[in-house]
Image: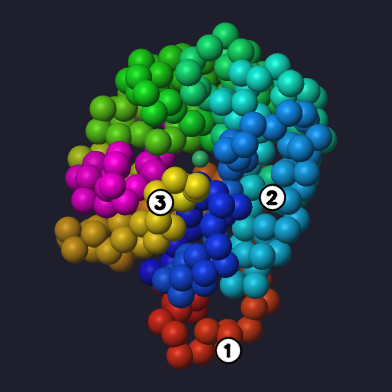
């Protein structure tokens, strides 16, 4: 099984996680810029963070044979802090860079006017830079938040095929499918979406335009839940080709629209994992 995790916050994970991911077939990741816990007080600390998502983190990943890309944005939560507004002026310079495969994560946290403004401005940037957009939906008030998200996406004029609406569940999947946007699901150990629930959604809606991620971050999360979902799909009767489509070809297709995906080998010697169950050579 080869796995591309389309939404994972490796900044908050250890190198042991990279090791376990590589040993279980995770060969590529996309790390969206997000909230780091401690509030940032100036655009300068975003610049350093963006540089680390484009420099240090891909280097760290490459040591484990994992290809790392990033999506950059002013996240919805910090869009509410006037001290961070200048990040919107920094973004054009960064969106030109090679490792950036989308604008994100953007969208709503508490659905405030400041979030409206940052969301619309960054969808405009996605259009201008011809990049996909990765859109976060709020964890509270999910149904209303998702409807409003889809309205803003439609009003922006961006092609729905360039937008992934993430953190969906049984309640929010249908409107996103109808919109023509990609549907993203974050699989968590306890709360929200689980591998068995994800399998049921795939049975009902099919595998097209579906993205499954572990979203692993500072909270209780598990970077191997993409792999677990693949195993649960196989156990439920999906074919290996179905699993490959959801866990590899779909994210490649979605982020490939940036023209910047690099899935070549990272140069880590195969022998580094000799004797382990690593599946880098197979699918
Ligand atoms: Zn996230």
Q: CA distance from mark 3 to mark 2?
A: 20 Å
Q: Quadrant of the C terminus?
A: bottom left
Q: CA distance from mark 1 to mark 3?
A: 30 Å
Q: Which residue is mark 2?
A: 53
Query: In the current view of this chain or complex, which residue is farthest to the front?
Result: 38
Residue closer to the observer: 253 or 170: 170
Q: Which residue is mark 1?
A: 271
Marks 2 and 1 close (CB-CB < 8 Å): no
Left or right: 180 in relation to 201: right
Does 211 sit above or below residue 238? Answer: above
Q: Earlier in the sequence, mark 1 or mark 3?
A: 3
Residue 110 x, y percent position in the rendering: 48, 18
Q: Earlier in the sequence, mark 3 or mark 2?
A: 2
Residue 208 x, y percent position in the rendering: 36, 44
Q: Residues within 10 Å of mark 2 (few under 14, many from 20)?
A: many
Residue 243 x, y percent position in the rendering: 33, 59
Secondary structure, mark 1, is helix
Respond yes or no on whether mark 1 lies under 8 Å from ligand 1: no
The magenta-colored residue range is 177-203
Q: Quadrant of the N terminus?
A: bottom left
């Amino acid at each position: 099984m080869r796995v591309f995790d389309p939404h994972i916050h490796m900044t908050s994970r250890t190198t042991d996680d990279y090791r376990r991911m590589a040993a279980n077939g995770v060969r590529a990741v996309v790390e969206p810029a997000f909230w780091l816990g401690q509030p940032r007080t100036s655009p300068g600390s975003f610049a350093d963070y963006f540089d680390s998502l484009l420099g240090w983190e891909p280097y760290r990943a490459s040591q484990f044979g994992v290809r790392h890309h990033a999506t950059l944005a002013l996240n919805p939560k910090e869009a509410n802090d006037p001290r961070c507004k200048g990040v919107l002026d920094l973004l054009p310079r960064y969106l030109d860079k090679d490792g950036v495969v989308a604008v994100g994560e953007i969208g709503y946290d508490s659905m405030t006017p400041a979030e409206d403004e940052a969301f619309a401005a960054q969808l405009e940037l996605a259009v201008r830079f011809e990049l996909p957009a990765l859109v976060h939906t709020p964890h509270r008030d999910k149904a209303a938040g998702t409807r409003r998200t889809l309205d803003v996406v439609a009003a922006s004029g961006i092609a729905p095929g360039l937008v992934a609406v993430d953190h969906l569940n049984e309640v929010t999947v249908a409107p996103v499918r109808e919109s023509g946007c990609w549907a993203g699901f974050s699989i968590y150990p306890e709360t929200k979406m689980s591998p068995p629930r994800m399998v049921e959604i795939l049975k009902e809606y099919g595998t097209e335009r579906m993205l499954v991620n572990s979203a692993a971050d500072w909270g209780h999360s598990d970077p191997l839940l993409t792999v677990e979902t693949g195993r649960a799909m196989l156990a439920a009767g999906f074919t290996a080709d179905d699993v490959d489509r959801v866990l590899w070809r779909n994210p490649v297709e979605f982020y490939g629209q940036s023209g910047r995906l690099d899935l070549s080998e990272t140069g880590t010697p195969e022998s580094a994992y000799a004797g382990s169950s690593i599946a880098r050579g197979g699918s």
